[in-house]
Amino acid sequence: MCLSELKTGERGVIVKVIGHSGFRKRIIEMGFIKGKTVEVLLNAPLNDPIKYKILGYEISLRHREAEMIEIISEQEAKEQVLQPGIYYGALAGEYTHFNDEYLRRIALGKRRTINVALIGNPNCGKTSLFNLASGAHEHVGNYSGVTVSAKEGHFDFEGYRFKIVDLPGTYSLSAYTPEEIYVRRHIIEQTPDIIINVVDSSNLERNLFLTTQLIDMDIRMVVALNMYDELEESGNTLDHYLLGKLLGVPMIPTVCKKSKGIGDLFHIIINLYEGADYVDEQGIINPEVAKEIQDWHHKHVDESNHGEHIEDYTREYKLHHAIYRHIHINHGPDLERAIDEVKEEISLNDFIRYKYSTRYLAIKLLENDEEVERWIGELPNVESIIKKRDKAIKRIADTLKEDSESAITNAKYGFICGALKEAFVDNYLEQRTVTKSIDAFVTHRLLGFPIFFLFMFLMFECTFIFGEYPMAGIEWLVNAFGSWVNDTMSAGPLKDLLIDGIVGGVGGVIVFLPNIMILYFFISIMEDSGYMARAAFIMDKVMHKMGLHGKSFIPLLMGFGCNVPAIMASRTIENHKSRLITMLVNPLMSCSARLPIYLLLVGAFFPKNGSFILLIIYATGILLAILMARLFSKILVKGDDIPFVMELPPYRMPTAKAIFRHTWEKGVQYLRKMGGIIMLASVIIWFLGYYPNHNTYETVTEQQENSYIGRVGKAIEPALAPLGFDWKLDIGLLTGMGAKELVVSSLGVLYANDAEANTTSLAERMPITPLVAFCYMLFSLIYFPCIASFAAIKHESGSWKWAAFTAIYTTVLAWMVSFAVYQIGSLFV
Ligand code: GDP
Ligand code: MG
């Protein structure tokens, strides 16, 4: 609980003080130190400040200050005895009365939980670090937008419990993208004890930009210099101690791929957590605290495992303030003056200082940050703050000849550049030339596109060719199972349900599992190696022609896997207009659930040129997406295009482990769908097709036509007849609205009732022409995506309007395209 919750006369022991360092320092200087007992002298409702007694002194704190102090009350300590072992390190049961020493020990035991948050650019290895530390399985993708929400986990290390949060990747902490706002709010509202700023060491300049913003916020943090292996391989050298000293932040080299440096990282975090607040001006640590740290070290740390860390408080002879200190990024005299002026005006409000560093607020105001402006809006002197700010901005524009926002950005890069000049030696060695020479080809103005399409073609060809063998095996198994059931069970509805409903429906879809795994295997390789980012890069120009942005390409490409995460990934696009259009056209990207439909029909009707037909289908989807995006950006969605930098991270050899894990995870997801929605739907479709009056008809066809589903199919048949579809095909489409795989499984059920069902494949039982099959594939590609995508669009765009719009426009478009192809095609064949 927090100190403000204690009532008059109650006592508690301090566990920790949260919030930004400036605030914490002040509170700790007042005597609110871990393990000390506080007594409430007067805490009446609506009474601010509250009066406390600590270390024999009387001190008043404001409510908002007391909220930032975590304590354990006597009451809680008593409950603790009833539930022994809740707090790590507590000595439940040993004491019978609650003397101060007992409370203190429980408080210190509770203190042994450290909340950390991972913050860093996309692709710097946050999720890898998270997985390593917490042991959780997580998707690790090589582009922004994979981690769309925070993942939490925990683990125990050297006598502490770490609660760790993997936050979405961001390049900066401005209020432009949902991720950035999310990360900022997490820092302010969840107040993690320590931030781990994960930095890609092979791209320091860019990554440290975020670090400088975190420094502005004045929060306790360490930097994990991840991908240190790449830095070393590149032949460049970094003095990370020096860089740490320059920035006032401990920097620990890590290689998440080889789990190197992780122990050191968390070891230093414990030091920072337990020590950094208790040093005096000279950087000498409070002797009582120092003793505790040393005790911890002796007890929990295997000395042989750790090298010499100058950040380590257990080595008393070091001057620690050389590392842990709060620096101000120097923005140059003009900006600093402006920052000071605005800060001074903000600081008149005592209470805002508890939560935010006022310097940070001042900098953000000068950057015209809308969210911070809203916070400031609550202050009584908001008008004079804004007036000061506007004046300062105007002066900066006059003297520096640039707007204050870019002036601040440039100053930060100047600072980083200077720091790197001292600590970093760029040897211009091969690593970058490898990336450069590959890039010369794959991002070439002319060669880039054919190479891209070649990769795509190879991907589909492999999906097709390599998928065939395991597919035949699974097919054989499904058939064998079907005949076995056929031979062993006595006739009746239950047997029919098993064979026609479940084996026919689920079996029809499960055979495509190998193909889907292969497709995901390729997508994972492209993501993890960094080629995906190149694909986005070469597409940037094309995307702009569509009224989109190169960044939209990744969500669109992800759509080939599944439209749902793809639609969610469009969050990373800053520009509202591009984001919305990307979502709207995403369903035209043919997701893997549609693949079984194509594979079924292509295999049966176009056995010779399967890959080619497949490529045409996918290309049609892309082409339509381009056309629609252009159309929408012209007439539907208003707004301007904003230019944006395209990232080109260096190529990485994807690890076999990561690739197989991603592929496997997708496979499992697919199988789950089989066991769940597809199984259920197959049974329902079978039921609707079996009843009513199953046994009263002469022929199977007659029976089917009179079943429930036959009636529905018949009812919509006229609408789809101009496309060449019969009512069975129509039903397939209807069921596909739930999930596209259901198209195949319901066709499986509908065409299963023939006599020779067990001897011929489904495709052979479908009495349609290749042209109809082709139109059917087109229709399946384009029409209503699926319930899940529909919901995703609603969620991401924030309104039903756009979801409904997508549902309608795709279905109308599907009809028009299939109609045109069928009618024109009929003239030739
Ligand atoms: P996130 O976007 O920050 O969560 O980054 P990820 O954890 O998804 O990592 C992106 C890619 O970098 C993955 O392909 C990882 O395998 C790779 N990676 C992570 N850590 C390291 C490292 O220390 N060295 C190298 N060479 N690669 C790494
Ligand atoms: Mg991640």
Image (spheres, helix red, strand yellow):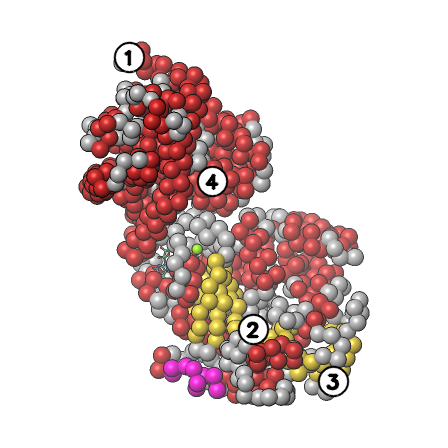
Disc number placed over residue 788 in the picture, else none: 4
Quadrant in which ligand 2 is drawn: bottom left
Q: Amino acid at mark 4?
A: Ala
Determine whether 344 is above or below 16 in the image: above
- Could you tell me how far apart the alpha carbons at marks 2 and 3 are, in whole angstroms? 29 Å
Name the amino acid type tagged 1. Phe
Question: Looking at the image, is mark 3 or mark 1 earlier in the sequence?
Answer: 3
Q: Nearer the viewer, mark 3 or mark 4?
A: 4
Q: Is residue 680 visible?
A: yes
Amino acid residing under circle 2 = Arg
The mark that comes first in sequence, 3 or 4, is: 3
Dividing the picture into quadrants, the one containing residue 535 is top left
Binning the other alpha carbons within 10 Å of mark 3 as few (below 14), some (14 to 19) or many (20 upward) gives few
**In terms of sequence position, does the residue under pointer 2 or pointer 1 come before the other?**
2
Residue 571 among those drawn in magenta: no
Which numbered dot is residue 325?
2
Magenta span contains residue 297: yes
Disc 2 to disc 1: CB gap under 8 Å: no
Query: Residue 434: where, in percent of width, then height?
Result: 29, 52
Looking at the image, is mark 1 or mark 4 earlier in the sequence?
A: 4
Given this view, does label 1 or label 4 mark the residue nearer the observer?
Answer: 4
Residue placed under numbered mark 1 in the picture = 828
Whether residue 776 is visible, yes or no, is no
Q: Which residues are magenta?
A: 295-303
Q: Residue at x 58, y 57 (%)?
A: 184
